[in-house]
Amino acid sequence: MTWATRAGDAEIRLQAQRLVAVALAVLGDPAAGERMADDALAESRTLGLRLIEAEILNALNVISSFGANLAGKLDVGRQSLLAYQAAGNQKGEAVARINVGAAWLDLGKIDEATRESEEGLRLVRANGDRAQECTPLCNLSVLALWQGDEARALALARAATETATIVQDRYREATSLLKLGDAELALGRYAASMEAFARAHELAVAIRSRSQQHDAAAGLARAALAQGDTGAALAAITPLLVLDAEAGTEHGPLDGTEFPRLIELTCHRVLVRADDPRARAWLRRAHEAVQAQAAGIADLSFRESYLRNIPHHRDILAAWNARSGERVDC
């Protein structure tokens, strides 16, 4: 940013500002990152730099994943898509389409998420962008699992894992293995599920991805519970329980995980099986987080799908109802 300012090059300066904004979010200050990106976005629009506008909007999409505004994430994704289309950038358009699909998935809008993810997959394949195939394949695997199509979920997860291995992207490989583990578990293939989650955890440790380590640990715990092995399930989540107890109030170990509410629900279920008194606190935490997120969704249709179409959200509400005897409204 400094050198581009000295050179009077607004385009490079705005690109650098975009990267700094994302870095701020990753380092734990998404609000500062969003402010910086918003400033860059306004300037790019004033200068009529449509491609840079699109890329800054894409950065805002990344930054939004660290916050709670799901509808805002969808809006930014749509704006990014329009900007890439206006700039004639097909590669960016494909990524934006995938991001829109992911935003729909976060809201529990299954049909919309499936449509956009499939279109994003078609576009990245047309562009020959093998690495980018992994994200829509993983999202489509999640959506298939939510709809009870375990065989399709498994096929999509396998395709994502194979692609990530071919392009030698260990982060995407770990993500794909998590989806593979979930699909194998849903099919009752416990050994294969444990193997996938264990491999994902191994990769996450190798690349120092703490969030993926937690996702994989929760997966191992779910697989162990399905086999009636409470001891193994408790061992899998124990490091997470320790980290959570030691964490500050602002940032916890679940920051950056794909489905933090699923991890909380998993911890609750393991602790219930272990007759551990901490179980209630984990359910309360999950329930409060789901309700707080839902309360921030103004659109009633979006709020309903968020609560009812995402299985672990639905399970959290049901578990809370069963324990508290209260009726949960949307």
Image (cartoon, helix red, strand yellow):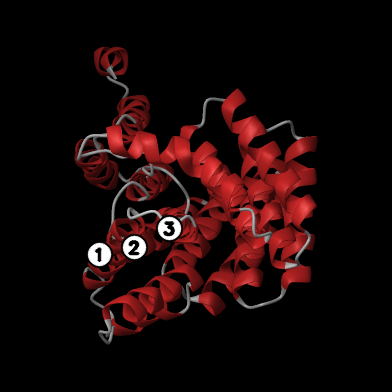
Report the quarter where the N terminus lies.
top left
Is 80 rendered above or below residue 242?
Answer: below
Q: Which residue is mark 2?
A: 283
Which residue is found at the position 32% from the left and 22% from the top?
9
How crowded pointer 1 is (Cα within 10 Å; few <14, some 14-19, many 20+) is rated as: some
Relative to residue 91, is residue 273 drawn left or right? Answer: left
Point out the tag, 1 or 2, that comes first from the N-terminus. 2
User: Which quarter of the picture shows residue 305?
Assistant: bottom left
Residue 17 drawn at (x, y percent): 30, 29
Residues at marks 1 and 2, CA–CA distance in whole angstroms: 8 Å
Q: Which residue is mark 1?
A: 288
Picture quadrant of residue 62: top left
Q: Are marks 3 and 2 in contact (CB under 8 Å)?
A: no
How far apart are labels 3 and 2 at the CA level? 14 Å
Asked whether residue 90 appears in the rendered view, the answer is no
Pointer 3 or 2: first along the chain: 3
Q: Which of pointers 1 and 3 lies earlier in the amino acid sequence? A: 3
